[in-house]
Amino acid sequence: LRLGFDLAARHPRPRAVAHLDAAARAGLIDLPRLGSWALASHDDDVVAVREAIARADPRAESLPESQVRVILQDAGFDVVVQYVVHGPRGRIIRADLALPELRIAILYDGAWHALRSQLEHDRRQARLLREAGWVGVHITAEVLASPRQVVAVVQTAVDARQAS
């Protein structure tokens, strides 16, 4: 339990939640148990820890993906985690995050997305998304470095969808 508390207490909210997501996904912490423990705690930073626990979601598959989720939630976006997009021929992609009502898939592209094999896969998925009427928004480490830029990139896609 102390591990989870320390992970959440020592980082700004997006990173705190990301660490809790990863620890819960790996089975290192039990979020409900940690939440109960935090409710009884009077340690410094307990309010921030409780907020991070409430936002944790072990379905997230990477630290950056979790950070993007928290940044977007903080900006008021109601994102869905690990959303499966279907097209006329079946499943197209499992988006890291999505705004399904607007048909926007949000994908974190780590460094491995620059590999030729992954780049070809990403291009194929982007084409399938477009054919199914979805828009793919790609967030990179460079974009993630600025939470405002993360929000701006997604807001631009939202504005474009709402205008059409």
Image (spheres, helix red, strand yellow):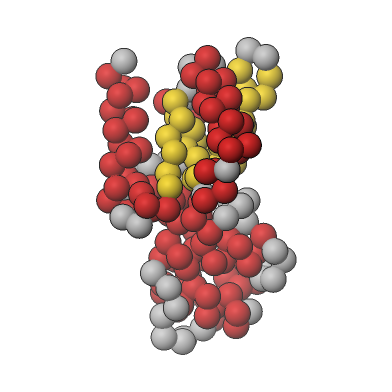
Quadrant holding the N terminus: bottom right
Q: Residue 43 location in percent, x, y?
A: 46, 87
Q: Residue at x 57, y 48 (%)?
A: 112
Image-based side of 151 in relation to 39, left or right: left
- Looking at the rendering, which quadrant does residue 128 occupy? top right
- Looking at the rendering, which quadrant does residue 92 occupy? top right
For the question of whether residue 82 can be seen, the reply is yes
Q: Residue at x 58, y 75 (%)?
A: 4
- Seen from the viewer's position, the closer of residues 93 and 143 is 143
Please tell me whether residue 144 is drawn above or below residue 83 in the rendered image: below
Q: Residue 98 location in percent, x, y?
A: 49, 36
View extreme (right): residue: 27
Please tell me whether residue 5 is drawn above or below residue 31 in the rendered image: below
View extreme (bottom): residue: 43
Quadrant holding the C terminus: top left
For the question of whether residue 81 can be seen, the reply is no
